[in-house]
Amino acid sequence: MWYFREQLVVYETLISKVVLVFVSMTAQWGSVKKYKSHQLARKLLRVICKELSSSNLYDIRSILGDPTFTAVLQENVDFVKIVFEECPEVILLEFKGLSIISHAISKGLEKICTFVFKRNEMNLLPTMPPDGKGNTLLHQAAKLSPSPKLSQFLGPALQMQRERQRFKEVEKLTPMFRKLRNKDKKTPEDLFKETHKDLKKEARDWLKDIAQSCSVVATLIVTIMFTAAFTVPGGENDDTGLPRKLGSKYFTIYIISDALSLLFSCTSAMIFLGIHTSLFREDDFLFKLPLALMFGLLTLFLSIATMMMAFGIALFIMLREHFMWISIPMLTLGSIPVSIYAILHVRIFIHVFRSTFRSYVN
């Protein structure tokens, strides 16, 4: 009997080690679907978590603790979802003085935050104690994210926006932490301003450079289209001073295109001037500056498009009687500058639009 008990202990230890190795490997697999055993691994992980849910917190931590922490850092949402559904106590486990959710928030792990913030366990956030330096969960959200993933899309401007969105989202969940100070006597807002000082400067300089360059282009278009309004194609009547082609429908299209181009370019210049003279406060990066950048780029695009339309119509009016074949290729070539502008700026426009109107936890 003693022999069989000893063998049972050996087998239990061996099984525990196998389970630990399996869970650790699953945490590092991520959401990769190419593994044929991925679905099987998820089912097996769920079975293990269900068995552990009835165990004490020490057993849960010893088996699921480190793998869950690894999965959070790698933004393995599949793993975290299964663990949190079967063993919600894991959300309270601490690693290096911080809970799992505190690590996710302080490091700006959007996928994990998106999943966790929608769970009922978020009601426990206000009860989470501060760390050794007195930093609450809102202080953790005020720290600069070490991940530079966002900067590869739009540089520091979009990253600053997402950092502020993360802070505001956690602030909604923990409003009681707004005025609390850490051991350095700093509120979460003070800590945010301090840690994001350099990023804010980079975002401000980037936006100013964009605004200055685009405002120069918009001003040039204003000058050109204002002059074009009084230099009508086909010339003027010597007796009346009116345009000779005044009754032509093509001339009407020309005047409308010219007026629209002038309107859009003036609007774009004013928008970019507003960006250049902005105070660049932290909250301005949430909506004001991104929306100004989007509408500035959009109106500049429309001004270029209508300018090229007016140019093409003017050529058509002057050449259609004798050189009709020339005007058609010129109209086609006139679309090239518009296409180039769209190709170069559509990615920026889309990323700013999605980041501005998409919630941090969606």
Image (cartoon, rainbow, N blue to C red):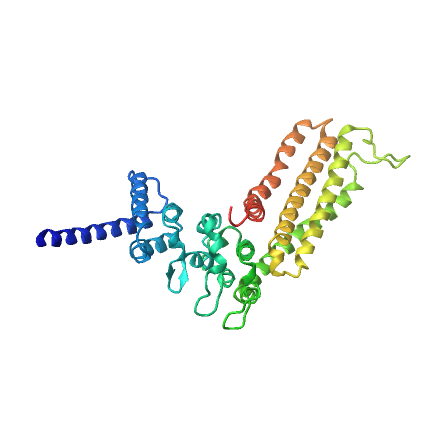
At which x and y percent is residue 309?
A: 69, 36
Residue pictured at 71% horizontal, 37% vertical: 310
At which x and y percent is residue 293?
A: 63, 50
The residue at the far bottom in this view is 184
Query: What is the number of callouts on the image?
Result: 0
Q: Nearer the viewer, residue 55 or 222?
A: 55
Q: Is residue 197 left or right of residue 300?
A: left
At which x and y percent is residue 251?
A: 77, 32
Q: Is residue 73 visible?
A: no
The residue at the far front in this view is 1
Q: Is residue 59 left or right of residue 224?
A: left
Q: Nearer the viewer, residue 269 or 155?
A: 155
Residue pictured at 46% horizontal, 70% vertical: 133
Q: Quadrant of residue 181?
A: bottom right
The residue at the far right in this view is 239
Q: Nearer the viewer, residue 323 or 217?
A: 217
Q: Is residue 133 visible?
A: yes
Q: Nearer the viewer, residue 314 or 131?
A: 131
Q: Is residue 4 left or right of residue 68?
A: left
